[in-house]
Amino acid sequence: MFKITHQEAQRLLQNAADQTLGVEDRSALDAHLATCKTCSSYASKLTTLETDLRRVLHTQIDNNLPNLDLQLIINSTGRFTWPSLFNPAHALGKATIVVTLLMGYFIIANLFGVQSPITENKTPPIIPTPNNSTLAFTTSPTPSSPSTLIGLTTQGCESIIYITQVDDTLEGIALQFRVPEKIIAEHNNLKTDALPPGKELSIPLCNHTPSHITGTLTSTMTITPLIETVLPAQRE
Amino acid sequence: MTEEQAGLIAACIQGDETAIAQLVQSHQLGVFRLALSVLNDPSEANEAAQDSFIAALRALKSYKEASSFNAWLYTITLNISRSRLRKRKTQERLKHTLTTIFHIRWQVAPGVEETVIHNEEDAALWKALGTLNEKHRTPLVLRYYHDFTIAEIAALMNIKEGTVHSRLSIGREKLRVILNNSRKVSGE
């Protein structure tokens, strides 16, 4: 049997506490403890500490009991249950409330004829200009034949056939329809900016810039910009 | 695993509410006390136990029958409880900082309803246990309250057996030193 030091004895005592002590180590430790009062006292204190730890932990923890919400656990497992459909704490319950509110809104809207505020907006279209004045357009219906017709281009875009009037310019038409001049020129094979009255122009709306003015342009009418009346200073 | 337990788990996977209730009721005490022994707060331990059951029931399909169901469930519980403890410590640090800067007073959450310990030695030991850091306290609690073996603690905490042994030794040694010092202070 081999002899061990106090330090080794204390290490083996720690192993013994964790029940990881081999047979040989156990014999060596027992032999050491039989002759060493210091290590024997250490062993005794360690055993007392273990016993006290068990007692204190049980005293402090055992008188607390769980109070789990079983229904919450069942509902949270993700499986569908009818009560979960009406439980605001559950995701399904929240979805039910949202759907019910939306359905209620649509039913009331249909019953009382509530319309979207956008459809009621009949204010005259205005376009802001750099000098903070406004640019107004007048409309003059053509009694004989419509000056604009809606068709489809080869690319499947909606297009408008516009018949040019006296004093019409490409820039003015581009401004009216919110389509770049270049696109109108290319689409109609225009080599120059000159636009004789009565010329048919096909205006593709694919390249149309969104604006609140468009809603008024789909009907049969001609639009003459009154640039001169609004911006006389620029002409000078 | 017994046939009965396997049947219960299969029924839980199918979403059988009676089976889920039975599973929760049969394990809730162990799960709650494990959470409580880590968190030292009954209210938070309840929440951690609930979260553990929810997580376990959602992951039940991935549970391998070869391993012990208890060990699997306790691993989930321990992870959730330790994660909560880390969050709480972060919040406490933040509160401490705010208290220092703005002199705000916080309402202290009630801890374990401490049984009056008549024995002064036991009171000192309970206090000393509270001063240990979590990595040394948890193995001691698992060993001396839950009676887990070193191998089981290693599996639960996902650390090596040698590390468990080392942490237990250090924990016991720290407790011994703290208790010795407190005896000296009290004049024994």
Image (cartoon, coloured by chain):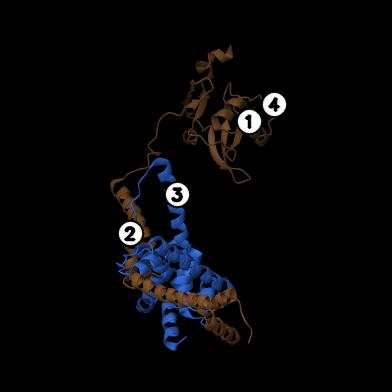
Query: Mark 1, mark 3: which one is toward the viewer?
Result: 3
Chain coloured blue: which letter? B
As shown in the figure, which amino acid type bears the numbered disc 1? Glu
Q: Secondary structure at mark 2?
A: loop
Q: Earlier in the sequence, mark 1 or mark 4?
A: 1
Mark 4 to mark 3 CA distance (whole Å): 74 Å
Q: Secondary structure at mark 4?
A: loop
Query: Residue B41: which disc?
Result: none
Left or right position of B25 against A40: left
Query: Residue B110: which disc?
Result: 2
Can you say which quadrant of the picture contains the N terminus of chain A?
A: bottom right
Mark 1 to mark 3 CA distance (whole Å): 63 Å
Would you say the residues marked 1 and 2 are in contact, meaning their CB atoms lie under 8 Å apart?
no
As shown in the figure, which amino acid type bears the numbered disc 4? Thr
Q: Residues within 10 Å of mark 3 (few under 14, many from 20)?
A: few
Q: Residues within 10 Å of mark 2 (few under 14, many from 20)?
A: few
Q: Which residue is label 1 attached to?
A: A181
Query: What's the colour of chain A in the image?
Result: brown
As shown in the figure, which amino acid type bears the numbered disc 2? Pro
Mark 1 to mark 4 CA distance (whole Å): 12 Å
Q: Which residue is label 4 attached to?
A: A192
Q: Residues within 10 Å of mark 4 (few under 14, many from 20)?
A: few
Query: Mark 1, mark 4: which one is toward the viewer?
Result: 1
Q: Outermost residue toward the right? A: A191
Query: Residue B94: which disc?
Result: 3
Instruction: Report if residue B43 is visible in the image.
Output: yes
Can you say which quadrant of the picture contains the C terminus of chain A?
A: top right
Q: Are marks 1 and 4 on the same chain?
A: yes
Q: Are marks 2 and 3 on the same chain?
A: yes
